[in-house]
Amino acid sequence: MIRRAAILLAAALILTSCGGGNNAPAPRETASRSNADIGKICRSSKIRGTKAAPIAPSLPGCGLTSGVNVYEVSGVRLSQPATMDCTTAKTLEKWVRKDLKGAVGRLGGGVSELKVAAHYSCRTRNHRPGAPISEHGKGKAIDISAIGLNDGSEISVQRDWGKGRKGRILRKSHRRACKRFGTVLGPNADRAHRDHFHFDTARHQGGSYCR
Ligand SMILES: [Zn+2]
């Protein structure tokens, strides 16, 4: 019974996340930003971005009243500004600074960029009508498909997971994220996550869910 319950829990958690692999394009800011608008946010000297305008829910349960558009964490730029709440931004920053940078080390000259596959997106789990809202619809989730390095190369979740040195870096980064985020999903979770890591700051009874 316990095992069956665990499987059901796992299935429920996976459904909370990314939605069947077809990550809808995340909303981009419509207004162009000058660099002057970008500054320290979330009371952290290590997070740079802008305050996000309140996002009204287009479905019940979505929306973000005091979010931020994150451009850079701990000196590492995001491939696109990512909208989230400050709890998620701070958790991401800590993961980059304390976990990812150490795992990558000097490979390719070190970490320069996070390739963001998805961030805020108001939708239900797996895009199913009537299903509960994804953590992406609450500003608590980010999907990362690759780590850009200073020499222009990258560590790709899809290409490098389970392979060689880059695979070991990805596995270590994934494992360490489990200490920080509520949910961490990667290629071992299901087919929907074969090409990205899903991180969210949802709180689960019994600690973080990591697969
Ligand atoms: Zn996701």
Image: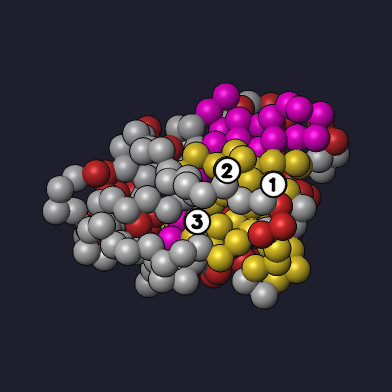
Residue 103 in view (yes/no): yes
Q: Tag 3: Cα neighbours inside 10 Å, few (<14), some, or many (≥20)?
A: many
Where residue 119 appears, as percent x and y from the top left, is 46, 50
Residue 80 is labelled as 2
Residue type, numbered disc 3: Thr
Residue 52: % across, % down? 50, 63
**Whether residue 179 is situated above or below residue 186 in the rendered picture:** below
In this rendered view, identify the residue nearer to me: 153 or 85.
85
Please indicate, yes or no, whether residue 2 appears anywhere in the rendered image. Answer: no
The residue at which mark 1 appears reads as 77
Quadrant of the drawing holding the N terminus: bottom left
In this picture, residue 87 sits left or right of residue 17: right
Question: How far is the residue under mark 2 from the one under mark 1?
Answer: 8 Å
Q: Residues within 10 Å of mark 2 (few under 14, many from 20)?
A: many
How far, Cα to Cα, is label 3 from label 2? 10 Å
The region drawn magenta spans 139-159
Secondary structure found at label 1: strand
Query: What residue does disc 3 label?
Result: 83
Q: Is residue 146 magenta?
A: yes
Label 3 secondary element = strand
Q: Which residue is pictured at 75% across the width and 35% down the height? A: 149
Give amino acid for label 1. Answer: Arg
